[in-house]
Image (cartoon, rainbow, N blue to C red):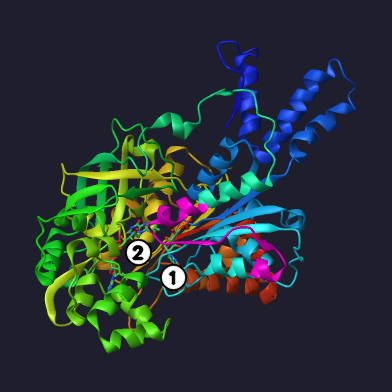
């Protein structure tokens, strides 16, 4: 967004342009508005008194404006908030867009128009960047908000029992604090646009009624192109067909002793010709195709013709194409269950749904696929009704396991193939994207895009130490981090905690880590192979054992990163960290909590968990 005058009439030197670019890059919307007024004032200041400057600057900010706050773990809420911000700005209204952890909470009581775009994580938890924001609004210290108009766009996944829980919670709480629901909340499932598009139209209509247009800015052209927009034409909606350069199983597959239960792949993709750029910490999005065997099995079970043409929305495809590339068939959703129950007439399924979020319903949503549902509760579906009822297929994200400084125009992934058996059926069940990647051999192409993650970055100060906690495929981004730090000769130390079931079969990138230790690229490595001894040992146990050193490193300014399983590992690691800080820092439980929150606020405790 760095911007000013149209070239070729740029009346400033390149050096001034670079300086200005640095300044404007660091400003949010309100800062940019203020700056525009200030600069106009300065220009006029050559003819008007200096006291007028502040007034001119404030004039621009004082017009009623909309504040958009977002909380996002994997970028979806952020993208929606950015899209809304752009629409409001294009319509000529004042807007400021802030990530929840950058929102000055003391300003809440003075807000007049606020919209919140927020996802739900964990078991109904806020995204990491919105923890303090949600805690503040939900807590006792939240002010009364009689003058506030607000709306919430909640993002979630209806296969989780607590669908859109955080958005709903904020919506209810703001009403409780006396704020006025400006327009209705949207609860967006994985096909986000279905709900987000009308919700944004409502936001725009509300803005037109309540806000005054801002003075239009002069036409602007970028001083220097924004790295991302300039770099590539490939995006989530226009993915790049990346060639698979290598696809290698990195868990053991030898004799009985060295065979792993897990099939984890190291996948190398070519980005050549795409213009796509990434940094360590970013993820790669993959648009998969469903397993062809599963599509065939579904068609057979439903006695439907795969070649039959189905029109839905603006697309006409064969039923097989719909099921292969456009619809989720491995993840169930509650709305689909409701529709299926009406057809199946199965009392057991009706009872499950009526009881709402019971453990049994959660189990069904988490552990059964469409084919399991059809087997257990048979029903008749017409092709077009089935396509309309199933959710659109969405891309999956994978942490990038390489540094571009080391691998050039490639991106490496570490993919656990989701494969499991179900009772009474000889066919394995697969996860859509991990199976798609597992069966994409060298030479195949995979539609991909880059999902940037600014919250999961190496320290700007390369002399800082880093502690990396990444069991299982959680190790992926840390391969990128260690590559990057070695290549850039960062002076800070790197300490990795890795774990998996068995050392002999599941030690991902074993040789690389051993080489890194020898070369000095990695300074410490602690391993937790859970099943190599009678009692289980996990990374959180190793952390506790090394508690004194972990605390010392933190006290000396180390950055802490956690990646991998969200359901158990991330919570157990969090609890272990709290214990370490309390015992080695001689703090109470509350003080330890504050310490960790402060690390998070400083960007020194970052998590990428899934
Ligand atoms: C930011 C981010 C980074 C990620 N990085 C990585 C990474 O580096 N490596 C990686 O491998 N993954 C990573 N993931 C996870 C990845 O995005 C996918 O979620 C994962 O690969 C599964 O997707 P799928 O399409 O194969 O399975 P899906 O088709 O999405 O799921 C299949 C279904 O099977 C169910 N299921 C899965 N296992 C079992 C089981 N044992 N028993 C019964 N039911 C089961 C699931 O609940 C689901 O309903 C990341 C996720 C995020 C959000
Ligand atoms: C580990 C994990 C846990 C999640 N838990 C929930 C949940 O409890 N309820 C829900 O509605 N959605 C849940 N979701 C789905 C996300 O809210 C959904 O993918 C959303 O689009 C993510 O938006 P974001 O990228 O802005 O974070 C979860 C997703 C992940 C990866």
- Which quadrant of the frame does ligand 2 lie within? bottom left
Label 1 beta carbon within 8 A of ligand 2: no
Q: CB atoms at circles 2 and 1 under 8 Å apart? A: yes
**As drawn, 338 above or below 400:** below
Tell me if residue 523 can be seen.
no
- Magenta-drawn stretch contains 183: yes
Tell me the quarter of the image containing the N terminus: top right
- Magenta-drawn stretch contains 94: no
Task: State the image coordinates of residue 22 (x, y, percent, origin top left).
Answer: 62, 30
Tell me if residue 443 can be seen.
yes
**Mark 1 or mark 2, which is nearer the start of the sequence?**
2
Count neighbours of disc 1 (C-alpha within 10 A) and say few if under 14, some if 14 to 19, many if 20 or more: many
The structure residue drawn at horizontal position 44% and vertical position 29%, both measured from the top left corner, is 230
- Number of numbered discs overlaid on the protein picture: 2
Task: State the image coordinates of residue 95 (x, y, percent, origin top left).
Answer: 64, 43
Query: Would you identify the image quadrant in which residue 217 lies?
Result: top right
Query: Would you identify the image quadrant in which residue 435 lies?
Result: bottom left
**As drawn, 345 above or below 98:** below
**Magenta-drawn segment:** 173-199
Task: State the image coordinates of residue 127 (x, y, percent, origin top left).
Answer: 53, 61
Specify whether 481 is left or right of 560. left
Q: Nearer the viewer, residue 263 or 108?
A: 108
Instruction: Quickly name the residue at label 1.
Output: 569
Q: Distance between the residues labelled 2 and 1?
A: 10 Å
Q: Nearer the viewer, residue 220 or 90?
A: 90
Query: Would you identify the image quadrant in which residue 510 lies?
Result: bottom left
Label 2 beta carbon within 8 A of ligand 1: no
The structure residue drawn at horizontal position 45% and vertical position 45%, both measured from the top left corner, is 452
Instruction: Quickly name the residue at label 2.
Output: 472
Task: State the image coordinates of residue 162 (x, y, percent, origin top left).
Answer: 47, 73
């Amino acid at each position: 967004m760095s911007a000013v005058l149209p070239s070729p009439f740029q009346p400033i030197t390149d050096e001034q342009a670079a300086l200005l670019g640095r300044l404007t890059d660091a400003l949010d919307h309100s800062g940019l508005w203020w700056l525009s007024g200030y600069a106009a004032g300065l220009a006029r200041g050559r003819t008007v008194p200096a006291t007028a400057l502040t007034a001119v600057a404030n004039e621009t900010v004082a017009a009623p404006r909309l504040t958009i706050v977002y909380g996002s773990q994997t970028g979806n809420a952020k993208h929606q908030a950015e899209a809304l911000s752009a629409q409001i700005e294009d319509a000529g209204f004042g807007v400021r867009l802030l990530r929840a952890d950058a929102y000055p909470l003391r300003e809440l009581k003075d807000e007049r128009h606020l919209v919140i775009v927020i996802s739900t994580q964990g078991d109904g938890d806020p995204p990491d960047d919105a923890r303090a924001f949600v805690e503040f609004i939900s807590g006792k210290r939240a002010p009364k908000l009689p003058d506030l108009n607000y709306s919430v766009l909640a993002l979630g996944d209806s296969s989780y029992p607590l669908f859109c829980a955080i958005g709903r919670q904020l919506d209810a709480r703001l009403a409780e604090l006396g704020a006025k629901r400006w327009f209705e909340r949207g609860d967006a499932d994985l096909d986000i646009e279905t709900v987000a598009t009308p919700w944004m139209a409502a936001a725009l209509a509300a803005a037109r009624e309540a806000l005054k247009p801002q003075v239009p800015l002069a036409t602007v052209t970028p001083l220097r192109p924004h790295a991302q927009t300039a770099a590539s034409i490939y995006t989530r909606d226009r993915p790049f067909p990346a060639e698979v350069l290598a696809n290698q199983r990195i868990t053991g597959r030898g004799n009985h002793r060295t065979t792993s239960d897990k099939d984890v792949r190291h996948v190398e993709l070519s980005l050549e010709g795409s213009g796509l750029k990434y940094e360590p910490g970013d993820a790669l999005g993959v648009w998969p195709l469903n397993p062809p065997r599963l599509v065939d099995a579904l068609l057979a079970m439903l006695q439907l013709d795969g070649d039959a043409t189905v029109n839905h929305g603006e697309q006409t495809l064969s039923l097989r194409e719909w099921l292969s590339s456009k619809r989720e068939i491995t993840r169930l959703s509650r709305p689909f269950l409701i529709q299926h129950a009406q057809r199946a007439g199965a009392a057991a399924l009706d009872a499950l749904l009526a009881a709402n979020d019971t453990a049994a319903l959660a189990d069904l949503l988490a552990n059964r696929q469409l084919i399991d549902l059809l087997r257990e509760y048979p029903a008749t579906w017409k092709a077009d009704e089935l396509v309309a009822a199933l959710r659109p297929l969405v891309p999956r994200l994978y942490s990038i396991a390489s540094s571009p400084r080391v691998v050039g125009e490639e991106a490496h992934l570490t993919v656990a193939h989701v494969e499991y058996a179900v009772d009474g059926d000889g066919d394995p069940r697969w996860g859509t994207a991990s199976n798609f990647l597992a069966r994409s051999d060298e030479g195949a192409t995979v539609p991909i895009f880059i999902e940037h993650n600014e919250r999961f970055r190496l320290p700007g100060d390369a002399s800082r130490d880093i502690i990396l906690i990444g069991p299982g495929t959680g190790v992926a981004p840390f391969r990128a981090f260690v590559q990057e730090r070695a290549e850039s000769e960062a002076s800070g130390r790197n300490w990795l905690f890795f774990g998996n079931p068995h050392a002999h079969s599941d030690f991902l990138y074993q040789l690389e880590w051993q080489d890194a230790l020898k070369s000095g690229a990695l300074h410490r490595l602690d391993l937790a192979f859970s099943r190599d001894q009678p009692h289980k040992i996990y990374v959180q146990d190793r952390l506790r054992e090394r508690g004194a050193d972990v605390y010392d490193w933190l006290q000396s300014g180390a950055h802490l990163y956690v990646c991998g399983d969200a359901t158990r590992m991330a919570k157990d690691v969090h609890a272990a960290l709290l214990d370490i800080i309390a015992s080695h820092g001689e703090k109470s439980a509350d003080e330890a909590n504050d310490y960790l929150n402060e690390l998070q606020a400083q960007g020194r405790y970052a998590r990428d968990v899934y």
